[in-house]
Image (tube, rainbow, N blue to C red):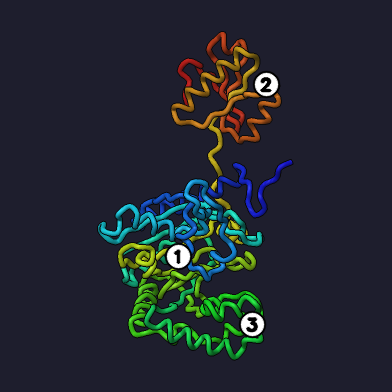
Amino acid sequence: MIQKIKGTMDIFPEEAGTFQYLERVMREEAARYGFGEIRTPTIEWTDLFVRGVGDTTDVVQKEMYTFADRDENRSICLRPEGTSSVVRALIENGKCGDTMPQKYYYIINCFRHEKPQAGRSREFFQFGTEMFGSDSPMADATAIALAASVLRRIGLRSVRLHLNSIGCRNCRPSYRAALVDYFTGHRDELCDTCRTRLEKNPLRLLDCKNPPCAALAAKAPRTVDHLCPDCRAHFDTLCRTLDAMGISYTVDPAIVRGLDYYTRTVFEFIAEGIGAQSTVCGGGRYDGLVSSLGGADLSGIGFGMGITRVILAMQAEGISAPEAEVPALYIAALGEEAAVAAMAITERLRRAGHVVECDVVGRSLKAQMKYANKLRAAYTLILGGDEVASGKAQLRNMADGSQREVTLADFTL
């Protein structure tokens, strides 16, 4: 038997309903905040993510699914994240010159070769947003407010916003120097991965989950203590704005995010009670990304929200998605002539917008009624030869058992 690839999932209707509910909420909230949907390819040139995400990141070094294109003799990959693809689309389609801000959202599947565990799979589903053309902290507040609005509407109470600023190209070098100086003094206590990060990407040292490294990171210099005046003012204004909007947060120096393109504001929404992979949403500002990929000098802010992790948080809090619509009617048919009539009535009512089911497997009447109960149909209509001949049948209310006669030719719900 051929089985699914490790780290992927099969989603059946009973589970897909939750995904559909979340996607509907995400689309509606994004539209409320003025974001329009963008759809980008599942496959991109590998160079896009090497340049965009950063060649020293775990995503590029360890996690991307890459393969050679047969015609171009270039490396292609399955997208590991959404931001770089949206930036590429913005540049390629000449949107950098349009009226700003440009505001997009997407619901996509992404791929990363990681160790599968609760809340982390090799194919995962993400709701993301990107806003271009505003370097104001009000843009940051808008992105954060949209994420908070989605989580609030779902009913999650255990999710907390953690906020930080990692500075810009002006103040980052001094912080980097302070970080390297601190961790160099503890080099022997670092894991092998962090020793490599110390040389290539010291900011990622703050993000290591290895307990000894995490203990060192807790005492490391803080980014917010090394901000230049502009970054300090930006972060202070953002905090004041979130206060005014009634969005609570914790300033958390450990929030740095794992991708190289982030600048200034970074944030995560963290859920309690769903295990190690507790970040349900993460994002930040990426002011140099568009220009680094060949576009205009446009600022950007966005986030990615893991749909599977949101579902885990819902389960931890006992929150269920609204139940799917049940059939308004089930038509039970006895015999071929009645089955044909049942199909005709079912199709007519479906075209009128109703959810209707009828037998298609040749069950007995008893089995059909049992199936109607399982579907929780509001009404049932039983058709046999006599009903078809007379053009009349009994419509049964499944809630109270009451019945009334209906004429088949003009019957409607």
Question: Could you tell whether 358 is left or right of 145 in the image?
Answer: right
Q: Which residue is mark 1?
A: 51
**Alpha carbon distance from label 2 to label 3:** 68 Å
Upstream in sequence: badge 2 or badge 3: 3
Taking the spot 39% from the left edge, 78% from the top edge, the residue there is 168
Q: Is residue 356 visible?
A: yes
User: What x and y, as percent, mark residue 385?
Assistant: 62, 11
What secondary structure is marked by label 1? helix
The outermost residue toward the top is: 389
User: What x and y, as percent, mark residue 315?
Assistant: 61, 57
| Figure quadrant of residue 245 | bottom left
Q: Is residue 332 placed above or below 94 in the rendered structure?
A: above
User: What x and y, as percent, mark residue 249?
Assistant: 46, 74
What secondary structure is marked by label 3? loop
**Alpha carbon distance from label 1 to label 2:** 60 Å
| Figure quadrant of residue 334 | top right
Q: Which residue is mark 2?
A: 362
**Numbered mark located on residue 190 in the image:** 3
Q: Is residue 23 visible?
A: no
Question: Could you tell whether 95 is left or right of 62 in the image?
Answer: left
**Alpha carbon distance from label 3 to label 1:** 28 Å
